[in-house]
């Protein structure tokens, strides 16, 4: 089973992600792509990048019009690339463990209301992003529910 954060862009609190600029995606990812350039863009318009950071970290990035799946990111600078991608796109990443949105302050007001309350707002650096996605996560408080009293 792979560990894959998902990147989306939201606008004005809408709950449907909006398309991301493919030129920006290419500008950020192509310098680090070690895959076959002829296979980067698929016939259906989706793109695939195999990204290797200068420090050696790697991840597969599967891109469609509305989202980017970051498959199996490893340590070693890959989160720096993802942080740059998020910043340039004005996008957010959903933590795979609990679907909490991780974003900059600029993107927070654009999140759908159901993601906004629990969102984790960070300075978008590789280190901060890596910690937000992989570090220890406190359990979310469950809403309190009235308990049933047992019959005596």
Image: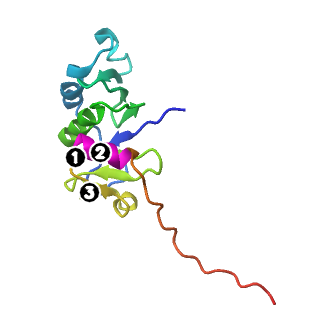
Q: Secondary structure at mark 1?
A: loop
Residue 71 found in image quarter: top left
Q: Tell me where the magenta segment starts and ends, as one range.
A: 124-133
Q: Could you say where residue 78 lies in the image, as x and y percent from the top left?
A: 29, 31
Calculate the distance from the C-alpha at mark 3 to the C-alpha at mark 2: 15 Å
- Viewer-closest of 4 and 27: 4
Q: Could you say where residue 1 lies in the image, as x and y percent from the top left?
A: 55, 32
Q: Which mark is residue 129?
A: 2
Left or right, 106 with reference to 67: left
Calculate the distance from the C-alpha at mark 1 to the C-alpha at mark 3: 12 Å
Binning the other alpha carbons within 10 Å of mark 1 as few (below 14), some (14 to 19) or many (20 upward) gives: many
Q: Secondary structure at mark 2?
A: helix
- Viewer-closest of 16 and 103: 103
> Magenta stretch containing residue 36, yes or no?
no
List the residue tagged with mark 1: 124
List the residue tagged with mark 3: 108
Q: Could you say where residue 64 lies in the image, as x and y percent from the top left?
A: 35, 30
- Residue mark closest to the camera, 3 vs 2: 2
Left or right, 138 with reference to 58: right
């Amino acid at each position: 089973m792979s560990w894959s954060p998902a990147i989306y862009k939201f606008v004005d609190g809408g709950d449907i992600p909006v398309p991301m600029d493919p030129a920006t995606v290419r500008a950020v990812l192509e310098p680090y792509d070690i895959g076959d350039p002829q296979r980067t863009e698929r016939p259906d318009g989706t793109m695939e990048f195999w990204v290797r950071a200068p420090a050696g970290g790697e991840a597969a990035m599967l891109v469609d019009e509305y989202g980017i799946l970051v498959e199996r990111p490893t340590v070693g600078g890959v989160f720096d690339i993802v942080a740059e991608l998020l910043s340039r796109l004005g996008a957010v990443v959903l933590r795979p463990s609990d679907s909490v949105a991780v974003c900059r302050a600029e993107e927070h007001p654009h999140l759908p209301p159901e993601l906004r309350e629990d969102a984790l707002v960070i300075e978008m650096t590789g280190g901060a992003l890596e910690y937000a996605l992989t570090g220890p996560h406190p359990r979310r408080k469950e809403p309190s529910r009235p308990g049933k009293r047992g019959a005596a």
